[in-house]
Structure formats: structure tokens, C-alpha cells
Image (spheres, rainbow, N blue to C red):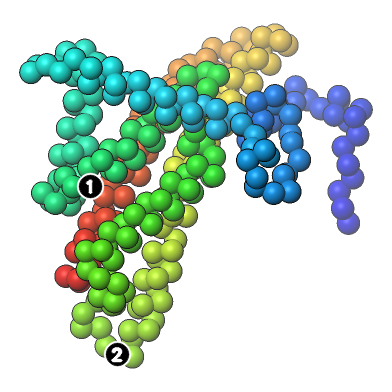
Amino acid sequence: MAAPAVTAAGAEEASPLSQGIARLLHELEVLPLNGEKAEVAGSFSPENFVLTNYSFWLLVAVVLMLVFFIVASRKSQLVPQGIGNLAEAGVEFVRNGICVDVMGPEGKKYFPFIATTFFFVLINNLLGNIPPALPGTGTVGTTFLWGIIVFLVYNGIGIKKNGFVPYIKSLVPSGTPGWLAPLIFTLEVVSHMLRPFTLGVRLFANMYAGHIMLGVFAVFMAISLEHFTPVSALVLPLSFVMQVLLRVFELFVAVLQAYIFTILTAVYISGALHASEH
């Protein structure tokens, strides 16, 4: 039997905590910039395009990334200073710490794609920690699409480097008994097909969960200020401390998730490059 609908009176009688959580979840939804839900478009024609809250901040992150590197590269110096030094440190970390370390000297060839992946995810993650911004990587649409791009790129590289038939044959390791080959091949195909999903879920879940936790303690603080009681005198400072700690932790998670997403991308490309050696 279907659950009874919540009446307007029931909604008004809901506890402040319930109301706060409901508002938090609403604000974290993918919504048009006016904050109101829109009907699903009947077609994907350009006139039906709607700029959402998440896509807006994603575009802001892209602009910030472009401005950052344009400004950093505007004045070329033997010893970079300021923002140039920061950009060079980031570029060197991606080139040597990810591309070369994972793929060897051949990895420098794929540095543009790997660097774009890293800085796109990183800047979106970091921007989401600045209220009222939302992380562009906080929706499955963005993270899954980027996972699909990685999937297409590394498989394209593997096919180009090894040839289509040898690349497909590499899914079954050499020396595998003939009777076991179909099972191993099936498992490998399923494993590869799941990679865009796992890449997308990991990044999305970490970004979304972090904002849920921050929002919950923000709700506690708002309720404590609005309905001040002796208990509020304890809840308010504790919630504030948790806000500060979670903000610091979210910065760490933002960098860590960008690194994990990028290092896995490099690992997948490396595996595709050396598929014929399996």
C-alpha cells in the first residue's frame, strides 16, 4: 500500500531539523539557475538546453583554469615567481609524478590529456569548497561523461598502438588454457566496461558526500541560532568546529580525488600501450 502523501499542514509541523535537511537536499539537486525544477525536455535540441547550478559552476571552473594558465605563462622567466611558480610545480608534478612514473618516458606524449584531466577535476573540486559554489564534479553527469572520455581515449590508444585484433586478444593473458579463455575474456570485457562507472561513482560520491556532511552541520548551527537553548550552547560551537575540520578535510579530499582519478587514467593508458606484452 502506498505511503500517504505529506500534507501542507504536516510539512509545517515538521521539525526544524527535517526542514533544514530537506532544504539542504534541495539545494544540492541539479536545478536550473532559478532554483525551480523544470520538466524533462522532450528532445535534446539546442533550444531545450537549460543552464543548471552545477553546469554554471563547472563553466566557472573551466574559465578559472584557462585564466590561471594564461596568466602563469604570460611572463616566461628562467626562475618562475608567484603564480608561475605554482603552475610550473603543478605541471611538473603531473608530467613526472604521473605520466613518466606510470607510463615511462613514453608517457610524456600523453601529458596534455593527463594534465587536462587532473586540473579540470582539481579546480572543480576546489571551487566547490568555496560557498556558494557547487563542484562541477558533484553530479554523475559530469563524472560519468569524463569516465567515458577516459574509456574511449585509452582504448583508442591501445588499438592504435597494437592493432584491433591484437588488442582484443590481449584481454586473454598468454598461457591461459583454451577452456578457460572464454570466461577470462568475458570477465575482462565486463571489467573494462565498468571502468567509466567506477571512475564516475568514486569521484561523484566523494564530492557529494562531503557537501552533505558540511550541510548537516550548517543546519545544526542555523537551528541552534534560531532556537537557542542550553543544548544549543554545546551544539553550536561543536558544529562550528566540525565545519572548520570538514572544510580542511574536504580540501584534502579534493586534491586526493583529482590525483586518484588521474593516476587511474594513466594506469589504464599504460595498460593499453603495453597490451601486446600481456
Q: Horizontal and vertical percent for residue 132? A: 55, 19
Q: Amino acid at mark 2?
A: Gly
Residue furthest to the bottom in view is: 179
Q: Nearer the viewer, mark 2 or mark 1?
A: 1
Which one is earlier in the sequence, the residue at label 2 or at label 1? Answer: 1
**Residue drawn 31% across the image and 50% down it:** 265
Q: Horizontal and vertical percent for residue 4? A: 89, 45
Q: Using the image, determine if residue 164 lies above or below residue 29.
A: below
Write down the residue under mark 2: 178
**Residue drawn 26% across the image and 63% down it:** 160
Write down the residue under mark 1: 110
Which quadrant does the N terminus fall into?
A: bottom right
With 274 as the anchor, is 46 left or right in this view?
A: right
**Residue drawn 29% across the image and 90% down it:** 178
With 74 as the anchor, is 225 left or right in this view?
A: right
Q: Using the image, determine if residue 218 lies above or below residue 115.
A: above
Residues packed near mark 1 inside 10 Å, few (<14), some (14 to 19) or many (20 plus): some
Q: Amino acid at mark 1?
A: Tyr
Can see residue 246? no
**Residue drawn 52% across the image and 22% down it:** 133
Secondary structure beneath dot 1 equals helix
Secondary structure beneath dot 2 equals loop
